[in-house]
Image (spheres, rainbow, N blue to C red):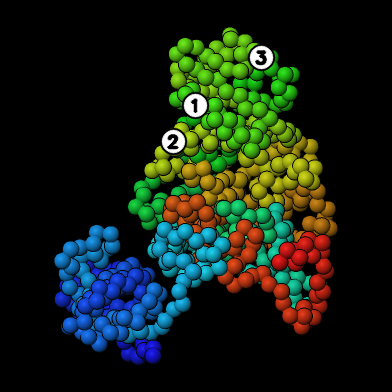
Amino acid sequence: MLDALGNLKRTNYCGDLRASDADKDVILMGWVHRRRDLGQLIFIDLRDRAGLAQIVFNKELHPEAHKKAEELRSEFVVAVEGKVIRRQKSNPEIASGEVEVMATRLHILNNSKTPPFQIEDGVTASEETRLRYRYLDLRRPRLHSNIELRHQIVFTMRKTLDELGFFEIETPLLTRSTPEGARDCLVPSRIHHGQFYALPQSPQIFKQILMISGMDRYFQICKCIRDEDFRADRQLEFTQLDLEMSFPRQEDIFHVIEQVMVATLGVIGVEVTAPFRRLDYKVALAKYGSDKPDLRFAMELHEVTSHFEPARETFKFEGNVQAMVAPGAAAWSRKQIDELVEAGKAAGARGVYTVKVAAEGISSALEKNLGADGLKKLAEALGAKVGDLIVAASAKDQIPHTDTSLNVGGALRLYLGDKLNLIDRSKWEFAWITGFALFEWSERDKRWVSAQHPFTGIYEEDIEKLETAPWECRSKGYDLVLNGVELGSGSIRIHRQDVQARMFKALGLSDEQAKHRFGFFLDALTYGTPPHGGIALGIDRIAMLLAGEKSLRDVIAFPKTTKAQDLMSEAPSSVDTDQLDDLGIAIKQTEAGMTAKKDE
């Protein structure tokens, strides 16, 4: 027979009890985490959001409560009345370990089936099982801590931006389809058959319209939905800090975000100083092989193509060769070298070449192609010392106006940094990346596309190159990077209607297409649009980094799997035919859908 909560009122959280609470009468509520029956004494660890408290049921002192405690099992929900007493021997593993509660009354509020896995951080259940029973997974202390940290991050961001004069303004979730790079998630209209809303990939157009509306400083903690392929740091729906400012210089936006991020890292007790480092995009690529460089270690790339020219025909590589010095790696085994080569190939390398610098001399399979003198000059050019390993690589694929060897070199740099323990995990290294190209080449579409989005500003002196040399156009965009992770992107926007029209033409959009997709926005631009700019930061990624997690799913309450499924609620799902009829929709069976149905 279960008990009712009645007028019972919790006095304390379990994990908040301390030695100063000794001799107090308390009422605790939570879940039975663990039960130990010693006959005359029954001990339970009671768990709530704040942590654990040990409860003692003494058969001699409180026989009725003790008898009832015999019924308890893991994850039963209970309320306990009792007195806080000091433990004879404290437990340093839990925050309340100096005290325990001598129970005088027990109320069993609900029972529980045996959980499919233990509610503890060392759980061995698969991620699929944990996501299916997410309500149980979220009871684990680590995930509790992550969700609390996320709350503190968002609260701190809101507080900081409020102090800086920003208005929090909500923008629509149901809007029109305005492709921004990924596929839109569409919502059919019941009232307007054959027409669709789109869920926002970002509030981009709306926040620019807010600047046209004179709101001056806007921010929002918003949901964005993009129908794109998943990985550990990407979800179908994600949360971002979105903001926009009127009449800003680039430095003004940087200053605001630096204040936000300094305050945010303060949540975990980390002090960082502003201003953050600035890196030109081309410099970042040339030095680190990435536009989101991990600056916690120094290993830099060097373009050594001229040293490899004698071997070009033999190795059949195109483009450039990048090299770096791996300190102390000359002693690596054949197996370690083979694993390095495989890592390079996985990153798109045509070839990965190594040179060992030892006390007895320089050795490499390259000697027959470059010669002993060539190897010596290569080592001197790179400043390699005894005990170092020179690692060089060329790229398999070549893209117009892009040095793909840098991407391969960047991937190998990160691999070596990890394997050689060069990355200082205690560091928090921010960088602003600027000077991006306005366009990038799309191999799929065989044309130039926006590197960011079509509203990104262009340097005034490059406007005349839009039609003649788009690859030379420089963007007024910028990224914020932390420890090799891109936290977000932003830009000074195009605020002139004539420039926006030229941008659309450069992207291959006719006047009719531009008007169809963005007509209301183009019209708004003609009514006195102020210069404006902004940025969007990924809150999921920020929370992931600050929590020390490797997957976004560990900092999101109800995440999707890599197959875009919510295993707990079993979404997506089929719907009734009546619902489809109301919307005027018929399901067209595709070959992929038939295969999926067969697999089920």
Q: Is residue 392 above or below residue 291?
A: above
Residue sitting at x 74%, y 46%: 449
Label 1 crowd (10 A; few <14 / some 14-19 / many >=20)? few
Q: Secondary structure at mark 1?
A: loop
Name the residue that disc number 1 marks. Answer: 332
The three-letter code of the residue at mark 1 reads Trp
Instruction: Pick the residue in front: 577 or 228.
Output: 577
SS at mark 2? loop
Label 2, residues with CA under 10 Å away: few <14, some 14-19, many ≥20: few
CB under 8 Å between callouts 1 and 2?
Answer: no
Q: Quadrant of the C terminus?
A: bottom right
- Disc 3 is placed on an element classified as helix
Q: Label 2 to label 3, Cα distance in Å? A: 32 Å
Q: Which residue is mark 2?
A: 421
Q: Is residue 6 above or below residue 515?
A: below
Q: CA distance from mark 1 to mark 2?
A: 14 Å
Residue 465 placement (x, y as % from top left): 74, 38
Q: Foreground mark, 1 or 2?
A: 1
Mark 3 or 1: the one toward you: 1
Residue 453, can we see it? yes
Quadrant of res 67: bottom left
Q: Which mark is residue 348?
A: none
C-alpha separation, residue under disc 3 versus residue under disc 1: 23 Å
On residue 369, which mark appears? 3
Could you tell which of marks 2 and 3 lies nearer the N-terminus?
A: 3
Q: Quadrant of residue 267?
A: bottom left
* Spot occupied by residue 109 in the image (x, y as percentages of width and height): 38, 84
The image shows residue 471 at horizontal and vertical percentages of 72, 37
Q: Is residue 387 left or right of residue 210?
A: left
User: Looking at the picture, which amino acid does disc 3 mark?
Assistant: Asn
